[in-house]
Amino acid sequence: MEMEIRTTSVRRKAKTSLTVKAAYILLVLLSVIMIFPFVWMLLSSLKDATQIFKLRFFPEAPTLENYRYILSGSSKFPQWFKNSVIVALCTTASVLFFDSLVGYALAKFSFQGKKLIFLLIVSTLMIPTEMLVIPWYAMARAMKWVNTYWGIMFPGMISAFGVFLMRQFMQTLPDDLIDAARVDGMGELRIFLTIVLPLVRPALATLAIFNFIGNWNAFLWPLIAASKPKMFTLPVGLANFSGEAGSDWHYIMTGAAVAMAPLIVVFLLFQKQIVRGIAMTGLKG
Amino acid sequence: MTLKARKTITAYAFLAIPLVFFLTVRFGPMLYMLAMSFTNWSLMRKIPAFVGFSNYAKVLSDPVFMQSLWNTARYAVFGAPLVIVISFLIALMLDTIPKGKGAFRLIYVLPYITPVVAVSWVWRWMYQPPPIGIINGILGALGLPAGEFLNSTTQALPSILVVNVWVELGYCTTIFLAGLQTIPREMIEAAQIDGANGRQILGKITIPLLNPVILFLTVMEGIQFLRIFTQVYNMSMQAMGGPLNSTKSAALYIYQKAFMYFEMAQAAAASLILFVIIMSITLLQLRFFDRKLSY
């Protein structure tokens, strides 16, 4: 009896170790597929105009000339890079402030109409961006916001997803702390800024990272809101540049690498928060 | 002033600007577009006139719109299940390995966080015909015939779809992994002691318990593929959704109607048709899963 149990458990162990090995092999193969386009982009960006058309894996004579061109004053990439930084940072700052403010009001105050307001805000999550760009454009034209930073940013100044996230977090805060501050005679805005906000720092970090990534990558609205190359964000600029570059693939791949670089840095710095955040929900609006 | 009054006033003071925002930048535009879809609205005309359903009729009788809806359906019907099945298998594999789970997951998530415009152009470069496209180079080295990929009316749509699958895999895998972690180990161990094999555990425990996750991802990915725009814009010649409209999605059709042909009212009608389709499919998915898989 004991023997029998031992042999089945040995057999099971042998079988699991085989499964584990097979899993590792498949996962490594898959990793190659996932990573390969990035590697190929990087290698292509190190080749010059003639090397790029020779189908060799590694560049014969790696050169940074493409990067020098893309990042120089004769290309518009530095301007687009600047635009993307401005847009991503400003919208993220606004989203952090307003979303936590709304989340706090909805989590920690009881008042008439609270449920309705929450439902109203969350229901906007169901309206995809594609449905709104036409009226937004009409609005931006009427207000003379086309080709301005504000025009690119205004639809993303508050995020319903962020409101939802912050409300969830705020609900876990103890009421006593806030009430004690009130008894001490502290003003409501000061309570929010000096007591509540520091307590929800992890949630703010997640929201900030996600919002930054989402805005950095956004394409459809920035494409419509800016028609002057000077106001393009990086994705719009890259699409425009690549469409006109024809067969200058070495420049296109370098531009793609430049557009990705900040995100890869953010990703490597905040990988834990990003993976945790994704598990909470997605980042595409 | 009572505490209650003070709290109400504070709450509304905090909510004032955001409420104005949601009303003017979300609900207002939606209603405005609905109203304009029944007029001959264009950016040039000062006062639009009511034209009934004629924009809807025009759009629905446009063979290009029908083609774009059909393409959109193909993106969603093939893309969403593909992403979900593959990412589920990846998550199961990641769940069995003792070490390196985090590193693999990191690699799989990378395409999801990088700009879609950039990866679209990288893939477009890889899809180039021989002798410059790397994928055709690899096919050639393996003795396989070259693919036309983005230049073919039959291969272009699957080629773009594959890129979106590649992008979305990491997201779905992460969600599945989080779901798998909620399944109690004891439950699986108890089943193993009772002699259940791997397939039985998968079919009787893992999948039923993951039902809410599968539902969530089906809805999310369904919507994601129905909205496909950036990939098509960047991977087709002149951003036209070609060759011969074979990759044009509904979102790209709407964009072109509005911002290339300036037919704003027709574009508004087309957007609302797409919106209704997305909403009804989402509701259908919710009902289907409710009946079929709930325990």
Image (spheres, coloured by chain):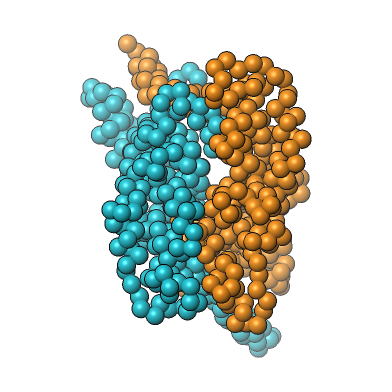
Chain colours: A cyan, B orange
Residue B135 in percent (x, y) is at 58, 72
Where is residue B34, by image quadrant?
Answer: top right
Residue A92 in percent (x, y) is at 36, 41
Q: Residue at x 65, y 20 (%)?
A: B39
Where is residue A145, by image quadrant?
Answer: top left
Q: Quadrant of the N terminus of chain B?
A: top left
Decide if residue B274 is in sight here: yes
Q: Nearer the viewer, residue A11 or A54?
A: A54
Q: Is residue B109 above or below residue A176?
A: below
Residue A250 in percent (x, y) is at 42, 66
Where is residue B17, by image quadrant?
Answer: top left
Q: Is residue A22 above or below residue B274?
A: below
Drawn side of residue B53 relative to residue A231, left or right: right
Q: Nearer the viewer, residue B84 or A8?
A: B84
Q: Residue at x 72, y 20 (%)?
A: B52
Count the numbered circles shown.
0
Q: Residue at x 31, y 35 (%)?
A: A196
Q: Is residue B99 above or below residue B182?
A: below
Q: Residue at x 41, y 62 (%)?
A: A251
Q: Nearer the viewer, residue B41 or A198?
A: B41
Drawn side of residue A168 relative to residue B239, left or right: left
Decide if residue A171 is in sight here: no
Residue B63 in percent (x, y) is at 75, 41
Q: Is residue A80 above or below residue A60?
A: above
Residue farthest top in this picture? B1
Q: Nearer the viewer, residue A265 or A45?
A: A45
